[in-house]
Amino acid sequence: MRYLFNLNTALGRRPSLRSKIRKCTEISNEHMTPEIKLHLITASCPLWHSNADKCIFIDPYWGFYWAGGQALSRYILDNKKLFKGKNVIDIGSGSGACAIAAACCDDVTVIANDIDPVACEVISMNSRLNNVKIHINNQNLLLSSLLMKVDVILIGDLFYDSEFGDILFQWLLKCRKNAISIFIGDPGRYVLDYNKKKQLSLVKEYSLSDNAILENCGFSSAYVWQM
């Protein structure tokens, strides 16, 4: 497995990119996992109020701690024994929060996967901020014919689009045949529909804070499912 991405080739000098990320985010732990500090786009950041055409990044989804990821990270931190000694991969990692939560468990090897090189840099920054070791992978693993040699797959907030959600779910079913444990964090998006949920077990429901409700399109709860 090729873990590390070549960000220097993809985006030029890393110090310059990190400086841009720091300027449009702030370090925050005001969320469901206060143990974890993240570079986030908050209401006090100019980028929060800017239009898309003025944003210096294309779709900075990595700057938000989405409800499903918060729930899944909270579940991991509250159930560390389930992940002890495991090889874990966080698919579509974004800010890296779920990967960081897994890395807080004992004797765990963690891979954070995201195809966006800017997200990969943010994951690197956030992992250092929390003093945890995470391997970073920026391949599109859903297009690979090889299944991951891991024990646990984490999926936070990736069922946001019907077409992609169907592709992802079929890929997860293939992984499940290899006895891989799969945990999904989601606030109740329509893409994770009844037919998909028939193949899942609900393991935890979390109520969202007022701020999280505002940031997550009015969803009042977030759920952790296991395939």
Image: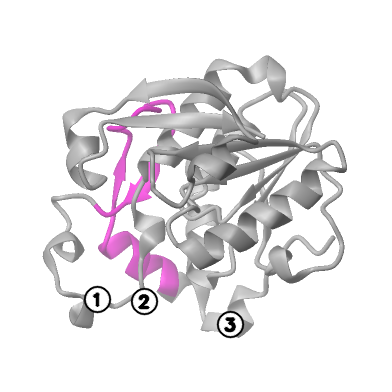
Q: Position of residue 212 (x, y in %)?
A: 24, 37
Q: Mark 1 and 2 residues: CB-CB less than 8 Å, in contact?
A: yes
Which amino acid is tagged 3?
Ala
Part of the protein shown in magenta: 17-41
**Along the viewing direction, whichever of 42 and 59 lies nearer the viewer:** 59
| Mark 1 lies on residue | 55
Which amino acid is tagged 1?
Cys
Rounded to the nearest angstrom, the CA distance separating label 1 from label 3 is: 19 Å
Can residue 131 be seen by looking at this rendering?
no
| Mark 3 lies on residue | 10
Lateral position of residue 191 relative to residue 3, left or right: left
Reading the chain from its start, which is encountered first: label 2 or label 3? 3
As drawn, the label of residue 15 is none
Q: Residue at x 39, y 44 (%)?
A: 38
| Mark 2 lies on residue | 58
How many callouts does the rendering have? 3
Q: Quadrant of the C terminus?
A: top right
Lateral position of residue 35 relative to residue 40, left or right: right
Q: Residue at x 38, y 39 (%)?
A: 188
Q: Mark 2 and 3 residues: CB-CB less than 8 Å, in contact?
A: no
